[in-house]
Image (spheres, grey):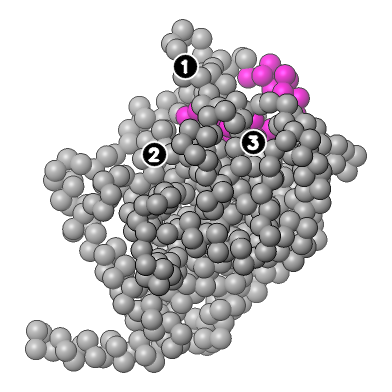
Amino acid sequence: MITRLPEIFFAVVESIGVHLHPVYYIFVPYWTLILSALALSPLTVLVPQFLQGKLKWPSDADARDEWIINGKKYNLRPFYKQHPGGSFALRASRGSDCTGLFESYHIFIDRNALYARLSEFEIKDGAPVEPPAMVFYDDFYKELKASVRQYFRGKGKGAHKMSSAHLAMCFLGWATMWCMIYRLLVHDAMWTIPCIGLLSWFLTGNVMHDATHHALVRQPWLNRVFSHAAFPYGVNVAAWHIEHVMSHHIYTNEESDVDLYHFDPIITLKSGEGTLPFVLHLTRLLFILSTAIPHLVFVVPYGLLFGQVEPLHGHRMYDRIKAILAHRQELRWDLFLEMAALCFYYYTCYCYHGLVKALCVQMSIYTISSYLFTFFTQVSHLQHDCFPEKGGFKDLSFAKRQVFSSMDFAADSRFWGLVSGGLNTQAIHHIFPSVSAMHLRSLYPRFREVCERHGVVLKEARSLRSFVWGFVQFAN
């Protein structure tokens, strides 16, 4: 067998050359390294840490029937079936402080009526509760909410969700993507690879993203179904709820925002740390960002399921989130089932294409979708001007923090609004996550006026070039 290794090696290289477009040749060593590390990790990481007692398995005690809202504890389990937003929204935040979720998702309901409804579920055991980390409701947020209610007044219940016409277009995109996947698997139609990559991002930005924010349709169960619209080339949705909805959207660009640590320590997103000569930095970005989606599809849910310590930086997956054990315990089956479904899809790809060709094809698609995902979800926040000096967030309310930590671009453009799924206007999206992104362009002029009236600086990139360049510089 050993004497045949060179023969096997050259056979694999030849196979890659046949099945991979030359534009992707540069990625092969990096892909090989990443896939090998992932395949070997059960032996090199999990087993040793298990024997050393380092694996951290969440228990039922980690996810108590307790929801903290504005410094009070509630047991909302009896409210699961009655909650208009569905039981998943409550289940996912079980055992944590969900003040930010409560304030940002209940825009169209009287606040006093909400607290009156909550009072019957309050836990009055006398135990002290840590106060909210920030002010979640101030005059600025109050006026912003009033302006949104005014905009949708008289347009019917659920007018802030996605329109039927937009839904139909998204369905057409989904059907087209699966037709192309069929052509790719059955008829070896390699021309579909870039199309599938583009469509998977379109469905991620326009459907999955809105659905995970309960902004797509009124029915909670349909939002859950549609949140998987980008499968098999979208993110792991359960992990996305933890990372995006419950961490990034509330603590944007703060210590508890786990978006800042995805590529740590290879890229450390702190000004002045980890700098490289510029050519090396661009090379680093070229490779690392090409695997953004595989990272969210495999590495993140893998880390959340097993709870291993990452040898490179000594942290467990998302351990900057205070209630991470509760989230892991509550969503462990959601994480597992999504990964199992994806493995079944890749087994199907293997049956049609064989191992080497299947890996080449899938990683080619992922490279396209990863670059688009990174551009539309990360660049808006990872700018030098979106990070305050040390302690600078301390005096800012929730709504003001969201504006400060976002850089919008082409906010009045219909094209960029559609292509980005509304993520070219991150500031207003973070303040009103339950409003479908298709409405954000129309709401933006009012948003500008309210920001100006309250002296809140709204950051808008001068050009696409300056927008991208700001991210490239900050990442170094």
Q: Quadrant of the N terminus?
A: bottom left
Point out the tag, 3 or 1, that comes first from the N-terminus. 1
The secondary structure that dominates the magenta segment is helix
The residue lying at 51 percent from left, 14 percent from top is 123
The residue lying at 66 percent from left, 57 percent from top is 461
Mark 2–mark 1 Cα distance, whole angstroms, equals 20 Å
Residue 36 x %, y %: 26, 69
Specify the segment rendered in magenta.
96-118
Q: Is residue 106 magenta?
A: yes
The mark found on residue 129 in the picture is: 1
* Amino acid on which disc 2 is placed: Arg
Point out the tag, 3 or 2, that comes first from the N-terminus. 2
- Does residue 399 appear to the left or right of 372 in the view shown? right
Name the residue beneath numbered marker 2. Answer: 320
Q: Quadrant of residue 363?
A: bottom left
* Amino acid on which disc 1 is placed: Val
Point out the tag, 2 or 1, that comes first from the N-terminus. 1
Q: Secondary structure at mark 1?
A: loop
Q: Quadrant of residue 6?
A: bottom left
Name the residue beneath numbered marker 3. Answer: 400
The local crowd at label 1, few if under 14, some if 14 to 19, many if 20 or more residues have their Cα within 10 Å, is: few
Task: Examine the rendered structure and indicate whether residue 221 appears above or below residue 375.
Answer: above
Q: Secondary structure at mark 2?
A: loop
The mark found on residue 167 in the picture is: none
* Amino acid on which disc 3 is placed: Lys
Residue 270 x %, y %: 41, 49
Dot 3 and dot 1 residues touching (CB under 8 Å): no
The local crowd at label 2, few if under 14, some if 14 to 19, many if 20 or more residues have their Cα within 10 Å, is: some
